[in-house]
Amino acid sequence: IDTNSNYDLVVIGGGSGGLACSKEAADQGARVAVLDWVAPTPHGQSWGLGGTCVNVGCIPKKLMHQAALVGNHLADAAAYGWQLPKDHHVPHDWNTLKNAVQDTIKASNWVYRVQLNSKKVDYFNALGSFLDSNTIKVTDKKSEKTITAKYVVLSTGLRPTYPNIPGAELGLTSDDLFSLKKSPGRTLVVGGSYVGLECAGFLKGLGLPVDLMIRSIPLRGFDQQCANLITDHMSGEGMNILWRCSPLEVVEAGNDQKKVTWLSDDGKKESQVYDTVLWAIGRQPRLQPLNLQAANVQLNQKNGKVIVDDEERSSNPSVFAIGDIAQGRPELTPVAISTGQLLARRLFAKSSRLMNYDMIPTTVFTPLEYGCVGLSEEAALKKFGEDECEVYHAFYGPYEYTIPHRSSEQCYTKIIALRDDPKTVIGIHFVGPNAGEVTQGFAAAMTCNITIDQLQSTVAIHPTSAEEIIKLRITKRSGLDPRAVG
Ligand code: FAD
Ligand code: NA7
């Protein structure tokens, strides 16, 4: 074996987890290679180094969400005295936004390459697959070679699911949306996941006619009271939500349009013509190209994810899996990053610290954002029982909504705490503007096991929306009205 291709660590998948792991391992003195290969979407779309988050996930999504929020500010501007032209309709240009988003992404792709280079991590723009536990076949556009590794980290992420219905291939997914060459136009978004709600939200915010199809409940796994406030807000802003409907087929309707037929709530078939159909019905690992049998890496048969232990180790002791493909892990970029860094330190810096998967905060970037950390009310009551939990809650009005008379009907916050001393806080939920910014600091407090007394004796920052969390006093048990007063 050529010693140049003999590594301490080979990372397969250069996304959030894989890049973090490879850079940290190199910092600890390991000889590292990282392989990243993007299989094009059925519509031929592909992208550069960095994985889902930077190319087709968090970053383009957040930028397009911001574009929609800028539209809200424009709508509010006149009330604040900005003398806009009398006709308030300001058109939006999709291509300007799409190009700006793609430029930002390409700059990041470049930065990642430079970072790998400066840390002396060998980067292969190539598909990785196992020949045996420690030997990886590296296949790029032109050639094939083998490299060996003491340890292999798998971080190959997920790809969107297509429904199993006729014409499904006529629809797009989030993997295509952010680089579309023309405005999506009239769009049907299918799926009540956060990806579905976020994409429907910003498309509507850009002024497009959007229908959102949800076959059961929104945001399964999240606090359902908060999830429903999000969809109530979307409906209130004019989004047509097709509740309890399931798609049956998609056919070409001429002019590059698609006719979608679905089964509605009352068992009838209904149809509508759209410019774009966006499937947001979940994401799955695509591990087949990895030839995992050759390394004896076992998968969960139900969801196809890699079975791992607390140390992220698979059924093969020299093969690890991190990020979205690992069984039972929250599918979030910061989780993949921390897991990758901690694993690299355990492998190469004699650390024994494990990733703590408790108290992982997140935010759904819907038009009205929703941030949370800890347990949902349902999960808290199920885990500890109704008698053991105190739920504090209130509706509130963000100050910035008053002058433009923006509706604050769904702005809401909720804390769930244990009733027994020391009355530890076990869940915080915030529905309102800037939810991600609000929730991050409270997540730090919860990581330190903050109690309700400590939270309530924290001095508020006035005037903010975040202070509403500090000011919560009304409990659900009291039956008092949680609606905002004054
Ligand atoms: P990925 O980042 O998916 O990287 C995997 C890489 O491996 C990819 O480049 C893939 O092409 C490559 N690969 C696959 N197979 C092979 C192979 N055999 N050989 C070589 N390379 C291979 N998370 C948040 O925290 N906040 C958000 O706001 C957020 N928004 C999102 C919005 C959308 C629309 C989506 C889809 C996701 C969002 N996420 C968000 C989730 C986040 O993007 C993922 O959790 C994160 O990217 C997972 O990182 P990863 O390292 O597991 O995999
Ligand atoms: P999720 O959370 O699995 O969501 C998938 C969504 O798509 C959900 O609303 C599903 O409805 C819906 N769905 C699934 N299949 C279909 C079909 N065939 N037709 C219509 N609608 C469908 O996926 P994500 O990848 O977005 O989220 C991943 C993680 O993020 C998740 O684990 C959470 O922790 C957060 P359902 O609820 O099944 O009725």
Image (cartoon, grey):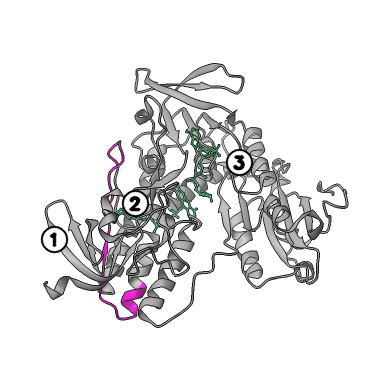
* For discs 2 and 3, the disc positioned in front in the rendered view: 2
Q: CA distance from mark 2 to mark 3?
A: 32 Å
Q: CA distance from mark 1 to mark 2?
A: 33 Å
Dominant secondary structure of the residues highlighted in magenta in the image: loop
**Residue 235, percent from left and from top:** 63, 33
Question: Which residue shows up at 50% across the image and 31% down it?
Answer: 208
Question: Which residue shows up at 38% across the image and 46% down it?
Answer: 159
Check disc 3 and report the residue beneath it: 83
Check disc 2 and report the residue beneath it: 103
Element assignment for label 2 = helix
**Quarter of the figure with the N terminus:** bottom left
Check disc 1 and report the residue beneath it: 145
Quarter of the image where one finds residue 386: bottom right
Contact, CB < 8 Å: mark 3 with mark 1?
Answer: no
Element assignment for label 1 = strand
Position of residue 63 in the picture relative to residue 124 (left or right) = right
Q: Nearer the viewer, residue 239 or 339?
A: 339
Instruction: Check disc 2 and give the amino acid type.
Output: Asp
**Residue 90 in sight here:** yes
Element assignment for label 3 = loop
Question: Which residue shows up at 31% across the image and 41% down it?
Answer: 41
Q: Earlier in the sequence, mark 2 or mark 3?
A: 3
Q: Nearer the viewer, residue 48 or 164?
A: 164
Quarter of the image where one finds residue 166: top left
